[in-house]
């Protein structure tokens, strides 16, 4: 008499289940290895989906950069006004203003843009 052993393959998680697990990990404050062990999730699977999530965020941010936005040209001020002119001014939706003067330091500007892209 022979006994048959059934080999059960692990069930594939749905996209929604994986997104839920990634969201739980992000809010858990646990280390990746701890979280994976507690949920029966492989470390590689979590890493892969975290990378996908970061990539999607970056591509969404980049695609927003190509979007058309309303632009208002300011009238040129007379030379008698004492307010220093700027080479470029950007007013963001939240009311924040970024000004770049004609003699701006390009290294500082690049660091500012990098910091804003990470947010």
Image: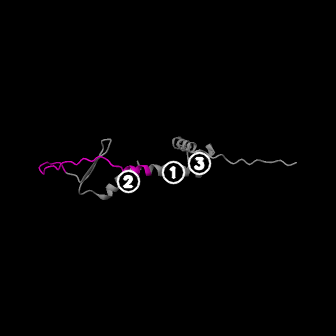
Task: Give the alpha-carbon distance from disc 1 to disc 2, as whole Å.
Answer: 21 Å
Residue farthest to the front? 68
Dividing the picture into quadrants, the one containing residue 35 is top right
User: Which residue: 78% across, 48% down?
Assistant: 5
Question: What's the magenta bit mostly, secondary-structure-wise?
Answer: loop
- Measured Cα–Cα span from mark 3 to mark 2: 30 Å
Q: Where does the magenta region start and end?
A: 59-84
Q: Of helix, strand and loop, which one carries label 3?
A: helix
Q: Where is residue 79 in the image (x, y as percent from the top left)?
A: 13, 51
Q: Name the residue under label 2.
A: 114
Instruction: Determine whether, in the image, residue 38 is placed left or right of residue 82.
Output: right
How far, Cα to Cα, is label 1 from label 3?
19 Å
* Mark 3 or 2, closer to the camera: 2
Picture residue at 21% right of the left edge, 48% below the top = 74
Look at the image and say whether residue 89 sits in the magenta stretch: no
The reply to whether callout 3 and callout 2 are in contact (CB within 8 Å) is: no
Residue at the disc numbered 1? 52
Disc on the earlier residue, 1 or 2: 1
Residue 8, image x, y percentages: 71, 47
- Is 68 included in the stretch rendered in magenta? yes
| Sequence order check, earlier mark of 1 and 3 | 3
Circle 3 crowding by C-alpha within 10 Å: few under 14, some 14–19, many from 20: few
Q: What element carries label 1?
A: helix
x and y percent of residue 105 in the render?
A: 28, 57
- Residue shown at the point (85%, 49%) measured from the top left: 2
Q: Going from the N terminus, do you reach mark 3 or mark 2 first?
A: 3
Residue with the mark numbered 3: 33
- Locate residue 20, reporting x and y percent: 55, 41
């Amino acid at each position: 008499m022979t006994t048959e052993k059934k080999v059960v393959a692990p069930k594939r998680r749905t996209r929604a289940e994986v997104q839920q697990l990634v969201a739980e990990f992000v809010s858990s404050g646990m280390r990746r290895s701890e979280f994976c062990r507690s949920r029966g999730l492989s470390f590689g699977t979590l890493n892969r989906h975290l990378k996908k999530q970061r990539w999607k965020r970056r591509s969404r941010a980049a695609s927003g950069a190509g979007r058309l936005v309303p632009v208002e040209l300011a009238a040129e001020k007379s030379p008698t006004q004492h307010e220093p002119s700027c080479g470029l001014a950007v007013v963001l939706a939240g009311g924040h203003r970024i000004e770049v003067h004609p003699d701006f330091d390009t290294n500082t500007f690049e660091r500012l843009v990098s910091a804003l892209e990470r947010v």
